[in-house]
Amino acid sequence: MISILLLVESRGSIKAKELAEDLEISVRTIYRDINILCEAGIPLRTTTGPKGGIQLMDGYSTGLKNLHADDFIHLYLSGIGIQPIQESNMSVQLNNALLKLKKNVPEELVNTFDTIRNRFYFDGSPWWGNNTQLSNIDILLLSVFKSNMLTITYQKVNGSSFVRKIYPYGIVVKQIDWYLVAYCDSSKEIRTFKCERIVKAEILNDNFNISDRFSLIDYWDRSKQHFFQKCADNEQYPVQIKIQKKHVQLLSGFEVIRMDEEGTELTITANLYSYDHALKVILEKVVYIEVIQPIELRVAIERTLNEMLQKYREFQP
């Protein structure tokens, strides 16, 4: 319903069919929500004819004039599922935009806002471990919005780091992971950088233009396929494991090659790079994970667990 109000006031007049297409719902749902808004005291009217549509009564405003460009950007990002990082500037601006909307709607809808806040809660923290730290997320978002070049310090998995000058083309959020898609001045190609590994970012004064032929969605789809193929072609140490679906978040960060589902259980093949690395990461989660292959790793884990059991058996308080 908020989206309907935003569209009606921003366009002046809009047909129900256009609203339905923009919001990806049925025309019937549009009319139902229009009735609810009218009952809440918002003076909406419908007119027929080529220039007709759904409009607000002359002189009435929902308060959209109080919203700035950034408010609309962050409302839109939230609407497509990109939730702001807690305590970031994006989070603050989204909250401010919602407060402006709340301030300018009838009392009946204010009560709806309060009900939503009191009865729905989004907890983005993992059950185990710490939240992903994205200390430079505001700089990255700003550089994408403004098409500003960046100098970043990027930390690799092994702890080493490098400095690159990049042209940020866009940001992709996949579940809880944020990725920056950018043209790298050093490699002379478009690369994907995991945002949590960008330990330092500095905005440069230089601006750039993105080619009209570039599509962020198409690039991401191609890069996913390339990633899967690369994993399949360059397995260094593939490990097959079983895990309950409810514990799958424990595998965050694993380079998954294949996943099969059976009931409440998942059988996953992941590239764990080497025997030593695989033994280390599996033992950290051994309560929840069963290794199927390779046999040498399964035997090593069994031996380690037996040694631990022996220590407990021999313990005398």
Image (tube, rainbow, N blue to C red):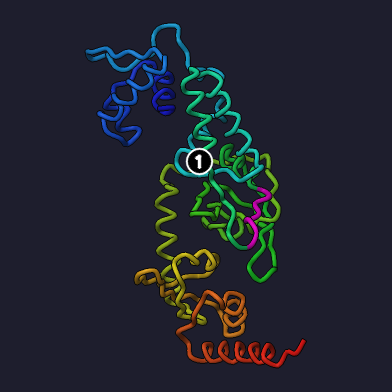
Q: Nearer the viewer, residue 55 or 309?
A: 309
Looking at the picture, how far across and down is residue 267, in whole percent? 41, 75
Q: Three-letter amino acid code at disc 1?
A: Phe
Residue 231 belongs to magenta span: no
Which of the 4 quarters of the picture holds residue 29? top left
The relative height of residue 229 versus residue 312 in the rendered view (above or below) is above
- Position in image of residue 15 (x %, y %): 29, 21
Q: Nearer the viewer, residue 183 or 27?
A: 27
Q: As drawn, is 140 to the left or to the right of 64?
A: right
**Residue 301 % position (x, y):** 57, 87
Judging by the rendered image, the residue that carries numbered circle 1 is: 120
Q: Quadrant of the C terminus?
A: bottom right
Which residue occupies the foreground of this view, 10 or 161? 10
Q: Which residues are magenta?
A: 129-136
Question: At x 43% / y 54%, what residue is drawn?
Answer: 219
Q: Nearer the viewer, residue 109 or 86?
A: 109
- Element on which disc 1 rests: loop
Residue at 61% in and 63% down = 128
Magenta-colored segment: predominant secondary structure: loop
Left or right position of 39 against 31? right
Numbered-mark total: 1
x, y percent for residue 28: 25, 29
Q: Among all residues in the image, which is located at the extreme top? A: 59
Q: Residue furthest left?
A: 49
Q: Is residue 57 above or below residue 193?
A: above
**216 left or right, relative to 118:** left
